[in-house]
Amino acid sequence: MKRTIITGEDMDLAFRSGKTEFHISPRDIVTSVAKERAEKHGITLSMGSGSSTAGPSGVGFDATAVFQKSARASSADVSPPYDMGYWRKQFPLLSKYIHVANCSQSPQSTYTRDAFEEYMISWNEMGMDWERWVEEVELTKAEFAKIINADPSEIAMGTSVSGMTAAIASALPRHTARQKVVYTEAEFPTVGHVWKAHEKYGLKTGFIPVTNNMIDPAEYDRYVDEDTMLTSICDVYYYNGFRQKLSTIIPKIHDKGSLVYVDAYQGLGTHPLDVKALDVDLLASGNLKYLMGVPGIAFLYVKKEIAEYLEPAYTGWFGRKDPFAFDIHNVDYADGARRFDTGTPPIPTAYISRAGMKVINEVGVDNIHQWTNVLSQHCIDGALARGLDVVSPTDIRIKAPSTAIRVPGNSHQVEAELRKRNIIGSARADVVRIAPHFFTTTNDIDIVLDAFVDILKKL
Ligand SMILES: Cc1ncc(COP(=O)(O)O)c(C=O)c1O
């Protein structure tokens, strides 16, 4: 029997069609909003023997449609526009586990494993092969550039977002009237730590508050001012998947004359992020979350037009015009983002990360976005219907794939209990995050949510 999610919209529709009774089947999930609306409209929810009268069934996948509507109508019937069976086989771990910790670490694929082996073989057989390895670095930058619609010359490579942020901090001019960096409370703490630590060099800082686990775009009008040199914002809040509307916020920041730096780590690869269309100045991301890679590599986008004004003191020989000039007396900055390269690049992780990002580009960010929206809606509705405490936005237009469920006591204990049930979730503070990816099914989400209910009952 098919499982349907009954939403508030279904109740509104039933009301407008003059219905006073709505048939549901025992397997249906009725959201709390649907229950409220049914009461408001005087509609009785009755257990029928047949299928429910909710929304259209058998909704096919429309790759160009706005997905929210079909997701709400009947997510169990929708399938992604790529070969799910093929892709699931590329992640051996999925034969044993449901992996919904992609906000922390995505699983290993056959592609990333092969890429790592390619490096190991090259090292073993060649001793060293710097020409090929340096080429791999350039190809990896290009693969990252493709995801954000940048030019490869606008990408620098490092090893962590923390390092990239520190490099930006060290590059900001010190003798200008503006000496303030404003950052949000939703930044991953590491980013805030870097800004705060630079107060010892005279940098002033201020932050934009989070209210109800979100940031009101109007706060940018208030907190970014004429003293602000740079505003440091995240695309997605790591805690609960709240996604900021960059197209609204960035013009506000630029209107005040401030540069904008985006930490895109928590969602990159799961929704389109076009640095040109959004007019982003600087953007960083690591690679191990939705980009399907590993720790030890990170990228920084530096807009062409501003690169020459930035001279990072956090630097190294690969940031020179000619790293092989071995001139200890001069610090000449390379053109473009390359001036933000530092020491010997992380070659093994470059191999792995290029393979992971190739998977993302192959499946397609638009396709991933549409499918993870289906999963997001399914997860929110299913969690609410089961009475779980959802601390993520319920509007998927302002949400990345991650759904945070607040749990009593120690969230890491819940994560451990999930693992005993072959589910890999991700605990943070008082929540456990369910963070699916393009290979996740709606059935996976149902199993995970049922496991939450079971665990929370027992704890
Ligand atoms: C949004 C965001 N930024 C930064 C980081 C940490 O980056 P790194 O460890 O590469 O400095 C994380 C990590 O989990 C994150 O979610």
Image: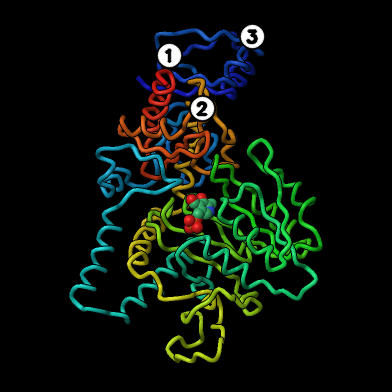
Q: Can you give x and y, in whole percent of width and height, for residue 214 in the image?
A: 65, 40
Query: Is tag 2's residue or tag 1's residue first in the polypeptide sequence?
Result: 1
CA gap, disc 2 to disc 3? Answer: 22 Å
Instruction: Determine crowd level at label 3: few under 14, some 14-19, many 20+ residues with C-alpha closer than 10 A.
Output: some
Q: Circle 1 is placed at which residue position?
A: 25
Q: Can you give x and y, in whole percent of width and height, for residue 104 in the image?
A: 43, 47
Residue 273 seen by the camera: yes
Q: Can you give x and y, in whole percent of width and height, for residue 397 in the image?
A: 59, 41
CA gap, disc 3 to disc 1? Answer: 19 Å
Q: Circle 2 is placed at which residue position?
A: 381
Judged from the image, the secondary structure of the residue bearing numbered disc 1 is loop
CA gap, disc 2 to disc 1? Answer: 16 Å
* Residue at the image point whose x is 40% and y is 23% from the top: 455
Along the line of sight, which residue is nearer the eye, 204 or 5? 204
- Identify whether 44 is placed above or below 167: above
Residue at the far front in the pictured view: 200
Residue at the far left in the pictured view: 125
Would residue 275 be found to the left or right of residue 2 on screen? Answer: right
Give the quadrant of the N terminus: top left
**Three-letter code for the amino acid on which mark 1 is drawn:** Ser
Q: Circle 3 is placed at which residue position?
A: 42
Instruction: Determine crowd level at label 1: few under 14, some 14-19, many 20+ residues with C-alpha closer than 10 A.
Output: some
On whether ligand 1 comes within 8 Å of the CB at mark 3, the answer is: no
Would residue 215 be found to the left or right of residue 1 on screen? Answer: right
